[in-house]
């Protein structure tokens, strides 16, 4: 049986790896990486650094070009569905061709595999077509949500309050009502003019990396930054 490990690797600092992740890497035979182009060269480089530190020298690195997708589609759900299908076709073929019986493969996932990442969905798609293709386990990682709170030295929730995690796309028309704290992820083009200027914002980018940026304060005051 082929075995895969989906390992969360944090947000940019190799020191983010948990002890469980380090142990899971120790006997990996093959690491699979989807390359998204020049804009993500640093992400591939981080994975190479982690592999060099924690995997034995004879591991194999399999890199493939990630299938393209439209960034601002008219039908977002249909576009993502087609992209996931293309990814499943690609990765299913790569796993079959490069991971032998009894070997261990790994996907090194930015942040935590459970939070706004498609790897687990893709693997389930592959298994839906071939239930015996492989077995897999998931190793949690430090997410950007945790890193943001730690960097700003704040608790995410107010006392007795809920935390709502969403995306920039989802709050284009405003924040949900009745939620004390909102964490917004995947917001490549942030705008705040439609939000209450008296809100308090804790913003971060490149969390955990040498280029980390942090801004906090009244939204109407620091928003333009």
Image (cartoon, rainbow, N blue to C red):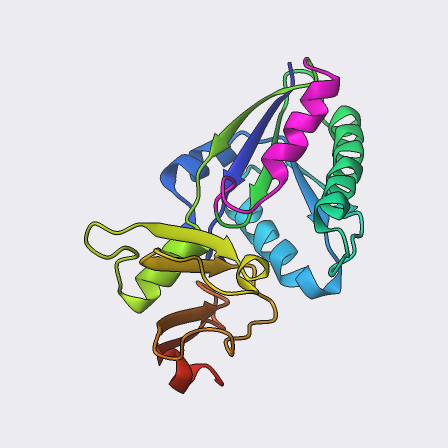
Query: Nearest the camera: 172 or 94?
Result: 172
In this orientation, which residue lies closer to the viewer: 225 or 73? 73
The residue at the point 37 percent across, 72 percent down is 201
Magenta region, residue range: 112-131
**Does 130 appear in magenta?**
yes
- Residue 216 x %, y %: 35, 76
Compared with 142, 93 (above or below) is above
Q: Quadrant of residue 215?
A: bottom left
Residue 38 placement (x, y as % from top left): 74, 64
Seen at 61% across and 51% down, the residue is 48
* Above or below: residue 66 compared with residue 13: above
Instruction: Indicate whether residue 42 is drawn in magenta.
Output: no
In the figure, residue 156 lies in which quadrant? bottom left
Residue 155 in sight in this render: yes
Indicate left or right for 217 with 23 as reference.
Answer: left
Q: Residue at x 70, y 20 (%)?
A: 128
Quick one: which residue is furthest to the left in this view? 159
How many marks overall?
Answer: 0
Q: Is residue 12 visible?
A: no
User: Image check: 175 left or right of 47?
Assistant: left
Percent position (x, y) of residue 37?
75, 59
Horizontal side of 68 relative to 225 (left or right) equals right
Image height check: is 177 above or below 194? above
Q: Is residue 222 positioned above or below 45 on the image?
A: below
Q: Residue at x 50, y 73 (%)?
A: 211
Q: Looking at the picture, how far across and down is residue 94, in whole percent?
A: 77, 32
């Amino acid at each position: 049986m082929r075995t895969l490990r989906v390992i969360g690797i944090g947000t940019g600092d190799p020191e983010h790896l948990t002890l469980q992740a380090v142990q899971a890497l120790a006997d990996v035979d093959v690491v699979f990486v989807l390359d998204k182009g020049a804009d993500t060269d640093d992400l591939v480089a981080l994975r190479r650094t982690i592999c060099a530190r924690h995997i034995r020298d004879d591991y194999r690195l399999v890199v493939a070009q990630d299938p393209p997708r439209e960034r601002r589609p008219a039908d977002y759900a249909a576009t993502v569905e087609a992209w996931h299908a293309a990814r499943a076709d690609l990765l299913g073929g790569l796993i079959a061709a490069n991971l032998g019986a009894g070997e261990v493969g790994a996907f090194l996932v930015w942040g935590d595999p459970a939070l706004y990442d498609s790897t687990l969905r893709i693997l389930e798609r592959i298994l839906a077509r071939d239930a015996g293709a492989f077995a897999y386990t998931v190793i949690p990682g430090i997410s950007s949500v945790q890193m943001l709170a730690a960097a700003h030295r704040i608790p995410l929730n107010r006392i007795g309050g809920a935390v709502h995690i969403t995306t920039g796309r989802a709050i284009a028309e405003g924040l949900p009502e009745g939620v004390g704290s909102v964490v917004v992820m995947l917001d490549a083009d942030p705008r705040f003019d439609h939000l209450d200027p008296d809100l308090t914002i804790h913003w971060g980018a490149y969390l955990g990396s040498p280029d980390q940026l942090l801004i906090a304060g009244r939204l109407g005051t620091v928003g333009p930054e």
